[in-house]
Image: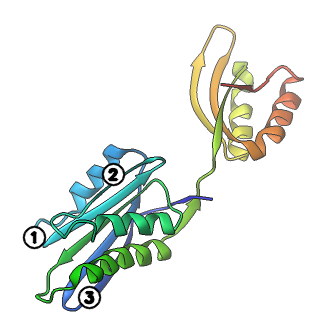
Amino acid sequence: MPSTLLDLCEYREEIRKSRFITLAAPITSAAEAMSFIERHSDLAATHNCWAWKLGQQYRSSDDGEPGGTAGRPILAAIEAQDCDQVVVLVIRWYGGIQLGTGGLARAYGGGANKCLQQAAKRLLVQRSDFTCSCTFSELALVKLRIAEVDGLVVDEQFTANGVDLQVAIGDAHLGALQQHLADLSRGRILLARR
């Protein structure tokens, strides 16, 4: 099951006099990934190579290194570690010794791999979207029950009769949550798949 990082992670190494710093972080959008890359890139460095993956979207950059020797190996490391919603930036200061295309691919991919291996991660739960309605007095308990099964309240709309909720729930917890909500409301609160 794919996972994402809990927080920023860093890995440093020196390979044949070239210094490499790898930074990895969780992301929730492509814009957030690009913002991370802009904020953490070192303009004084020789290369700032990166890759990010967000569901089916992904991008990478070799930033002047020979084609396919930096961005793709970083992306391959993200996939090899079964990560998603992650951005990885590898900053290189050239040390005067050529690494060759294989050496570059190993350096960039290896640094990304080691950084992601040591990072604190959390599993990404696959959730489905549902709607339900409750009264104002039930709202706090409904939100508590949703949080207990690692669900998310995506949206809430207040109406004259109560609250309409859009929620995201993992399929494994669906039955238990439906039972809790039914018990709470004497069968009135029902989850409807969107």
| Residue count near mark 2 (Cα–Cα under 10 Å), binned few <14, some 14–19, many ≥20 | many
Q: How is the image coloured?
A: rainbow
User: Percent from the top left, x then y, of residue 91?
Assistant: 23, 71
Label 3, label 2: how many angstroms apart (C-alpha)? 26 Å
Tag of residue 14 = 3
| Residue count near mark 3 (Cα–Cα under 10 Å), binned few <14, some 14–19, many ≥20 | few
Amino acid identity at mark 2: Ala
Q: Quick one: which residue is furthest to the bottom in this view?
A: 16
User: Percent from the top left, x then y, of residue 116?
Assistant: 45, 71
Amino acid identity at mark 3: Glu
Q: Residue at x 65, y 19 (%)?
A: 164
Q: Is residue 137 above or below residue 47?
A: above
**Quadrant holding the N terminus:** bottom right
| Disc 1 target residue | 44
Q: Nearer the viewer, residue 28 or 107?
A: 107
| Disc 2 target residue | 33
Q: Is residue 17 above or below residue 54?
A: below
User: Which badge, 3 or 1, comes first in the chain's sequence?
Assistant: 3
Amino acid identity at mark 1: Ala
Q: Kindly indicate whether the residue at mark 2 contacts the one at mark 1 (C-beta within 8 angstroms).
A: no
User: Which badge, 1 or 2, comes first in the chain's sequence?
Assistant: 2
Q: Is residue 117 above or below residue 148?
A: below
